[in-house]
Amino acid sequence: MKTKIDNALRVIAKVLLSCIHWGLIINLAVMFVLMLLQIFLRSVLGSSIKWSDELLRYQFIWLVFLGLPSAIYYGELTRFDMLEQKFGPLARKILCTVLDLIAIVVLYLMYKGAMTLVTRQMTHMATTMDLPMGVVYSVIPVSAGAGIIFLVLDLYFRWTNAPSLREGVKRV
């Protein structure tokens, strides 16, 4: 039974991670094409698309915030590696758990604050585009929520002594 639950949780994490990665890929591709188009239009035709700079700025926000859950999934956040190495296995497990719980609290506060921001900004429109600013900032709660899911799953796998959420990555 536990193996089925573990496998289901891993599938959920992989699907969520795939959605995030596809969001990053599409976002980066659109940014690249839009920048090339802007360079071409400014250099060759002497004019530009008036909303492109604003859209690129918003896409950069999405790129940064969508990268956060991916970094959490792969364990690429800043850690106290030197401190962790000085402890035994149980103390290391407890330290990593405390750090993950702190990260969950921070992400929860980020999520809660961002939901207020998104709600308030839905009535404010972008300067050159017909786009509510709440849409731009909606990536923040999405990012925080996905990060919390990955951290909770990692805690579950750590304390049930199951293999790491990240396959092929040595677990603490």
Image (cartoon, rainbow, N blue to C red):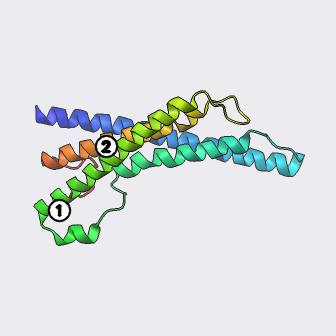
User: Is residue 8 shown left or right of residue 46?
Assistant: left
Mark 1 residue type: Arg
User: Is residue 115 shown left or right of residue 37?
Assistant: left
Place of residue 20 in the rendered image (x, y in percent of width and height, measured from the top left): 44, 40
Q: Residue at x 16, y 32 (%)?
A: 4
Q: Residue at x 26, y 38 (%)?
A: 10
Nearer to the camera, 104 or 11: 104
Q: Is residue 168 visible?
A: no
Q: Residue at x 15, y 68 (%)?
A: 87
Mark 2 residue type: Phe
**Which secondary structure lies at badge 1?**
helix
Looking at the image, is 81 positioned above or below residue 167?
Answer: below
Closer to the chain start, of discs 2 and 1, is 1
Q: How many numbered callouts? A: 2
Q: Residue at x 18, y 49 (%)?
A: 158
Q: Is residue 74 visible?
A: yes
Q: Which residue is mark 2?
A: 150
**Which secondary structure lies at badge 2?**
helix
State the separation of the CA atoms marked 2 and 1.
19 Å
Q: Which residue is mark 1?
A: 92
